[in-house]
Image: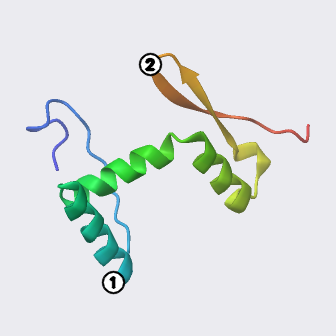
Amino acid sequence: MIEGKGLGGKRVNRVNASLTNKEDGDLRKLATACGMKHTELTWHLIRRCLYDLNIVNELQKEFCTQSAYKVVLLNNGMEIEYVLRGREDI
């Protein structure tokens, strides 16, 4: 895709996720219940998870192996920013 072409100057980054048949079916059912396409619901789910402090902390607690790469979410008035915590072992 050509950057900015027909998108009002926005850059598009596509993310492919492999879902099981059950997960895909559940996603489509929820999307239908919410009156939207499954791709739109996926976008909402990703955005909510990315900027939810509890979910971010749970994911880091479970999967983060390098403390130098842990992030902190900062509320900068209008938006939430990701900030690297840095190394704690120095």
Residue 88 point in image, percent of width and height? 86, 39
> Is 90 drawn above or below residue 34 in the view shown?
above
Q: Which residue does the numbered mark 1 point to in the structure image? A: 21
Q: Residue at x 10, y 38 (%)?
A: 5
Looking at the image, which residue sits at the far front? 33
> Is 57 drawn above or below residue 74 in the view shown?
below
Q: State whether residue 14 appears in this view.
A: no
Residues packed near mark 1 inside 10 Å, few (<14), some (14 to 19) or many (20 plus): few
Residue 6 point in image, percent of width and height? 8, 38
Give the camera-side residue of 45 and 3.
Answer: 45
Q: Which residue does the numbered mark 2 point to in the structure image? A: 78
In the drawing, does residue 81 fall left or right of residue 6? right
Q: Quadrant of residue 4?
A: top left
Q: Residue at x 26, y 38 (%)?
A: 11
Q: State whether residue 43 appears in this view.
A: yes
Looking at the image, which residue sits at the far bottom? 21
SS class, disc 1: helix
Q: Amino acid at mark 1?
A: Asn
In the drawing, does residue 18 fall left or right of residue 81? left
In the drawing, does residue 43 fall left or right of residue 38? right
Quick one: label 2 or label 1, which is nearer the N terminus?
1
Give the camera-side residue of 90 and 58.
Answer: 58
Looking at the image, which residue sits at the far left? 6
Give the camera-side residue of 41 and 66.
Answer: 41
Q: Amino acid at mark 2?
A: Met
The quadrant in which the C terminus is found is: top right
Residue 65 point in image, percent of width and height? 75, 58
